Amino acid sequence: MGALYLSGGGDRDQTLAIDKEFAGELSGGKSLLYLPVAMDPGEISYETCYEWIKSVFAPFGVKDIAMWEDLRGKTLQDLMRYSAVYIGGGNTFRLMSNILQSDFHVHLSAFKEKGGTIYGGSAGAIVLGSNIATCTHVDDNDVLLKTRNGLSFLDNFSIWCHYEEGNDPLIHQFIQAFHKPIIALSEETGLRILSGRMEVLGTKPAYVFDRDLIKRVFEPDRFI
């Protein structure tokens, strides 16, 4: 079983500590695979996205980065050529639609089962949870995605990114509607999930909201 890394989003300075931990996972002489497909290339080009991901990981000596602009036709064998997969941010509905329409979720799950490492940033983190409706206060569903199911790589937890304390009433509404516990990550907070254990990364705490709306605080370097 491979490791999962999640980031609440933010710029490269805010995610520095999380990205450094992730970069330490890369080994075996294989490239890092970057998926920018949550972005609308009509608004921000994939070339710009690629320059950004290179700037994020260059300080850690990670220079061999491949990028897929389209998930259609990709296979598990294609994924296994890479040391890890980085799923970038953007519109969560667009990302989930791309994943489902290409059946990429099947290959991504198999990649994880075979020991592959996956990083989800912002929208990329949200789709790894059990329900993606945590994004509805910031993302429009322009792709008319019908399902709100995520990939459920974190059991029953859903992920709330770009967390601020003012989001608490919205989080309560989500839990009352979907009966899912939430892990809320600020723009300087991340998670590492390995062998069933969830460790808080970054410089700010993670917050766990259970189905009874009880909120618990977990500081960096602690396990949830």
Image (cartoon, rainbow, N blue to C red):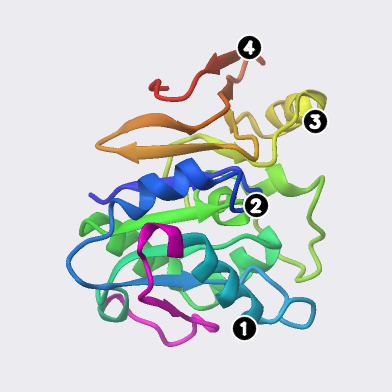
In the rendered structure, are the residues bearing label 3 and label 2 in contact, judged by CB atoms less than 8 Å apart? no
Residue 65 sits inside the magenta stretch: yes
At horizontal 20% and vertical 71% (from top left) the residue drawn is 29
Please state which of the two labelled residues, at mark 2 or mark 4, is closer to the viewer: 2
At horizontal 25% and vertical 77% (from top left) the residue drawn is 81
* Residue 47, label in figure: 1
Label 1's element? helix
The amino acid type, in three-letter code, at marker 2 is Asp
Label 3's element? helix
Q: Earlier in the sequence, mark 4 or mark 3?
A: 3
> Residue 137's spot in the image, x, y percent?
82, 45
For the residues marked 2 and 1, what is the alpha-carbon distance in whole angstroms?
18 Å
Check disc 2 and report the residue beneath it.
Answer: 11
Q: Earlier in the sequence, mark 2 or mark 4?
A: 2
Label 4's element? loop
Q: Quadrant of the C terminus?
A: top left
Q: In the image as oriented, which residue stretches furthest toward the left?
A: 28
Check disc 3 and report the residue beneath it.
Answer: 170
First to last magenta residue range: 58-76
At horizontal 40% and vertical 20% (from top left) the residue drawn is 222
For the residues marked 1 and 4, what is the alpha-carbon distance in whole angstroms?
43 Å
Q: Earlier in the sequence, mark 3 or mark 2?
A: 2
* 177 lies left or right of 79: right
Residue 74 sits inside the magenta stretch: yes
Query: 208 or 62: nearer the eye?
Result: 62
* Residue 214, label in figure: 4
Rendered view: 40 above or below 87: below
